[in-house]
Image (spheres, rainbow, N blue to C red):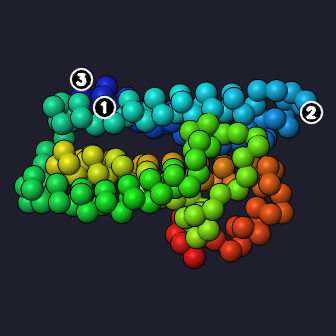
Amino acid sequence: MFAWLNVGSILISAVLFLIFYNLSVSPAQLEQKMGAGAAGAYEKCGRYRVVAMIFMLIAAINYVIYYFYPLPISLPQTFAWGWPISIVIGVVIAIPSFWVMARGLIDAGPEAVAPKKEHTMYGGIYEKIRHPQALGEMWTYHIIGFLLNSPFLVLLSFIWLPIFYWICVAEEKDLVVRYGRSFIEYQQRTGFLWPR
């Protein structure tokens, strides 16, 4: 029973992460809804982002708990090839993923954590790809699944790919509101989740 509750917690955390992160990437739209001169939309979105990160952390903790309390299903508990191979696979995925994510965090600056109205569009890696942080971060749970040598967790991790895609789509809608024509031109010359 506990194992099922744990997996349920992963799924609920993933959905809540999606909801709150989508809210966090929409400060310009929220500001429009609140009305001209209304303050606090960007700060509110920053708080949404913190809540989203908490749910992401809860899901990661639940992944580790799954290692100790796996579901009683017919899928093997571990990969047939053994832990060392799984660790190598996890590291091979982690190196480029974390590099792209870190590059995006560095080039975005403080805006990566809390949206700011006065922030301008980014340079650096963002000149080639519009969502490097999402591209790197979407593989985090696959990495955890491989490091825990769990076929179930690796398969479950595929739920994060559409989640990050939907977040990027929601963010782009807000960035069009925020930056207008300059963002539309930027979209035309850069890749969405893959460099151009």
Please determine whether, in this image, residue 81 is positioned above or below residue 77. Answer: below
View extreme (right): residue: 36
Residue at the spot x=61%, y=27% of the render? 47
Q: Quadrant of the N terminus?
A: top left
Q: Quadrant of the C terminus?
A: bottom right
Question: Residue type at mark 3?
Answer: Met
Please determine whether, in this image, residue 181 is positioned above or below residue 22. Answer: below
Q: Residues within 10 Å of mark 2 (few under 14, many from 20)?
A: few
Please determine whether, in this image, residue 86 is positioned above or below residue 5. Answer: below
View extreme (top): residue: 2
SS at mark 1 in the image: helix
Alpha-carbon span between mark 2 and mark 3: 51 Å
Please determine whether, in this image, residue 79 is positioned above or below residue 32. Answer: below
Question: Residue type at mark 2?
Answer: Ala
Which residue carries the number 3 mark? 1
Q: Residues within 10 Å of mark 3 (few under 14, many from 20)?
A: few
Q: Earlier in the sequence, mark 2 or mark 3?
A: 3
Q: Please say whether residue 73 is visible from this viewpoint.
A: yes
SS at mark 2 in the image: loop
State yes or no: discs 1 and 2 in contact (Cβ < 8 Å): no
The quarter holding residue 116 reads: top right
Q: Position of residue 65 (x, y in %)?
A: 23, 30
Q: Please say whether residue 151 is visible from this viewpoint.
A: no
Q: Position of residue 59 (x, y in %)?
A: 37, 34
Which residue carries the number 1 mark? 61
Which residue carries the number 2 mark? 36
Q: Earlier in the sequence, mark 1 or mark 2?
A: 2
Question: Residue type at mark 1?
Answer: Ile
Q: Earlier in the sequence, mark 1 or mark 3?
A: 3
